[in-house]
Amino acid sequence: MAPIGVGDTLPDGQLGWFDGEDKLQQVSIHGLAAGKKVVLFGVPGAFTPTCSNQHVPGFINQAEQLKAKGVDEILLVSVNDPFVMKAWAKTYPENKHVKFLADGLGTYTKALGLELDLSDKGLGIRSRRFALLADNLKVTVANIEEGGQFTISGAEEILKALSREVNFRVETDQIATAMAVL
């Protein structure tokens, strides 16, 4: 299956998540993302070095800036069980905005076309590292890494894309205003 790309609709899927009352919930991606601007980012695994030390902290540290640029939800998905994701989330006590979602069987990751076979490392089928920006379920940015790289899927890249989006809207509005005057 081809990986999800710009212009595609986020597929729906059920993922495990511990809510604010520490209750395990099955949540729908469409339920979380419909009618909203969301960042959905994925990592190969909880507690792995790049994911834990760079990727996740980047989104946690930039969450307020993402929210200021119109992002309603920041969703992290990993092919792990909900209890692992809960334990991993607890290692970031400063986190107020990133939801740690469990794709226990990798079903949602497969629906995105972003599975990564790490069987040779003893990890089985996991997720490629990625960051998607979607507006009302339509993907507007798809930053998908190759292999284990971490170059284009961080929070900074999403912030840059949001800035370009804002600049484009301003320029479009200015052109429309100028055309109206003519």
Image (cartoon, rainbow, N blue to C red):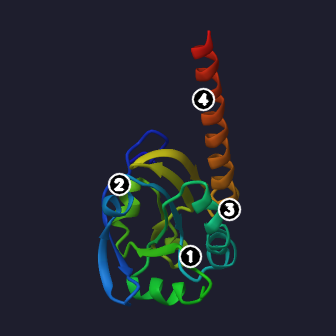
- Per the image, the residue denoted by label 3 is 150
Q: Which of the two discs, 4 and 1, labels the residue nearer the N terminus?
A: 1
The label nearer to you, 2 versus 1, is 2
In the rendered structure, are the residues bearing label 2 and label 1 in contact, judged by CB atoms less than 8 Å apart? no
Q: Residues within 10 Å of mark 4 (few under 14, many from 20)?
A: few
| Residue visible at 41% across and 42% down in the picture | 8
Is residue 9 visible in the rendered image? The answer is yes
Tell me the distance, in whole angstroms, between the alpha carbons under discs 2 and 4.
26 Å
Q: Residues within 10 Å of mark 1 (few under 14, many from 20)?
A: few
Q: Which mark is residue 34?
A: 2
Tell which of 118 and 100 is nearer to you.
Answer: 100
| Residue visible at 67% across and 38% down in the picture | 167
Amino acid, disc 1: Lys
Lateral position of residue 14 relative to residue 77, left or right: left
Establish if 94 lies above or below 1. below
Amino acid, disc 4: Asp
Tell me the distance, in whole angstroms, between the alpha carbons under discs 3 and 2.
28 Å
- Per the image, the residue denoted by label 4 is 173
Amino acid, disc 3: Phe
Tell which of 83 and 25 is nearer to you.
Answer: 25
Tell which of 23 and 49 is nearer to you.
Answer: 23
- Per the image, the residue denoted by label 1 is 121
> What is the secondary structure assignment of the residue under circle 3?
loop
Establish if 24 lies above or below 106. below
